[in-house]
């Protein structure tokens, strides 16, 4: 399972400078336009003979070959079926993935939304011909052609899985049961020293989402598209929260331990953390707050410099095939992207637990995206604060 999605400041700046440099005319956010023009590239129209190998960059738990657990292996069957030998570089952060893709040594990457636009804007990720991925037809419609995996109606990847950032709390310490992010913002003082938050600059979007619902006068429409005034308001809220934070977390095992011990009693979490903590008898529950939540949708993207593109496409189709997608989702702890995967899970209640096909649930989730100067909400009369500034602000918030 993934230990961290933390974003590191040093690697971030280059990618976002590239995103800024690639600026073009404004786009329609509903059609996938992000207000910048990617380098001109085209997706392959057909596949040829597989090259015999494929080099992947993946989150831990996404390309298991039995070496961590002999019972967990969907790589070996892929190798036997396709003849493509898999080499996987496990990355701990989105920024590490971005940097590794720049080397040209890898064929595909399981990018989260906070990395995907950087890869598209820099020309490191190529458009994808979804027609060459047969199982794409069964991907949930809500994951296709979205703002983090397409630009101007051109697909740049195949959706892998998704999850929401939930509000978790100790039932014996937090009363009444919270239904709002107010618990970790305005009411954080009640639990001073025992509040936890995700350790990443993308967490600024969580504050922006709360303000979007509670301070409509700010005019926030997209928590990843913040002009300077909106951004300053979110940063101010997080600086205030910092005084009540006991620990920022990036390692899910440490968060489980903190909630079990009582060092943390309320804060952001993932469904897999909730399930694991409850399984270890911690008195915790979690809720998707009434304001909604941020979340992630990971996308398999093909490198523009892929040396083994045909094997890469075989992998993209394999990893979202029903049985394999179900295996990954259960092992990792996320909702699968393939609708047919729900019939393949060993736990028949799994998809219900992770809201796999709950459209109303996912409409409340604002998936991670890469903040760029060209506002992702379609505004053209202002400049939005780019990701590099988010990274700088996060250091100040924690400092």
Image: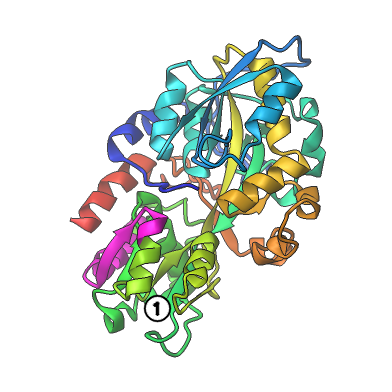
In this view, the residue in front, 251 or 151, is 251
Task: Report the side of 257 relative to 111 (left or right).
Answer: left
Task: Report the side of 337 relative to 60 (left or right).
Answer: right
- 58 versus 139 height, above or below: above
> Residue 394, percent across and down?
28, 52
- 356 versus 170 height, above or below: above
In this view, the residue in front, 326 or 123, is 326
Q: Which residues are magenta?
A: 231-254
The residue that label 1 is drawn on is: 183
| Residue positioned 70% across, 27% down in the render | 78
> Residue 240, percent across and down?
25, 69
Check the image and name the residue furthest to the bottom: 176
Q: Main secondary structure of the magenta part?
A: helix
Rendered image quadrant of residue 346: bottom right
Instruction: Categorize mark 1 by other alpha carbons within 10 Å: few (<14), some (14-19), many (20+).
Output: many
| Residue 119 within the magenta-colored segment of the rendering | no
> Residue 33, percent across and down?
61, 38
> Residue 288, percent across and down?
55, 71
């Amino acid at each position: 399972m993934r230990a961290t999605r933390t974003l590191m400041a040093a690697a971030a700046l280059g990618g976002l400078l590239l995103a800024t440099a690639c600026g073009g005319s404004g786009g329609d956010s509903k059609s996938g336009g992000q207000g910048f023009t990617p380098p001109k590239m085209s997706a392959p129209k057909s596949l040829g003979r597989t090259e015999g190998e494929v080099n992947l960059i993946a989150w831990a738990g996404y390309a298991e070959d039995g070496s961590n657990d002999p019972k967990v292996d969907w790589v070996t069957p892929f190798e036997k079926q396709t003849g493509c030998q898999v080499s996987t570089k496990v990355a701990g952060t989105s920024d590490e993935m971005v940097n590794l893709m720049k080397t040209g040594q890898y064929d595909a990457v399981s990018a989260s939304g906070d990395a995907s636009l950087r890869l598209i804007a820099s020309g490191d990720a190529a458009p994808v011909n979804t027609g060459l991925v047969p199982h794409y037809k069964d991907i949930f419609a809500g994951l296709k052609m979205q703002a983090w995996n397409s630009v101007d109606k051109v697909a740049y990847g195949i959706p892998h899985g998704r999850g929401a950032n939930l509000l978790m709390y100790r039932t014996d310490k937090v009363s009444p049961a919270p239904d709002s992010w107010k618990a970790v913002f305005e009411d954080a003082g009640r639990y001073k020293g025992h509040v936890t938050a995700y350790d990443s600059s993308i967490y600024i979007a969580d504050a922006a989402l709360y303000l979007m619902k509670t301070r409509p006068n700010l005019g926030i429409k997209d928590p990843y598209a913040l002009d300077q005034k909106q951004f300053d308001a979110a940063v101010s809220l997080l600086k205030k929260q910092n005084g009540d934070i006991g620990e920022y977390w990036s390692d899910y095992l440490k968060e489980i331990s903190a909630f079990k011990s009582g060092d943390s009693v309320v804060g952001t979490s993932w469904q897999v953390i909730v399930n694991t903590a409850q399984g270890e008898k911690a008195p915790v529950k979690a809720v998707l707050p009434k304001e909604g939540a941020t979340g992630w949708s990971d996308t398999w993207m093909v490198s523009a410099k892929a040396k083994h593109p045909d094997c890469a496409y075989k992998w993209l189709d394999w990893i979202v095939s029903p049985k394999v997608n179900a295996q990954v989702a259960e092992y990792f702890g996320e909702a699968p992207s393939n609708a047919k995967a729900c019939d393949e899970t060993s736990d028949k209640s799994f998809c219900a637990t992770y809201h796999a096909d709950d459209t109303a649930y996912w409409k409340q989730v604002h998936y991670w995206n890469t903040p760029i100067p060209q506002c992702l909400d379609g505004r053209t009369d202002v400049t939005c604060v780019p990701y590099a500034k988010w990274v700088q602000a996060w250091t100040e918030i924690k400092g």
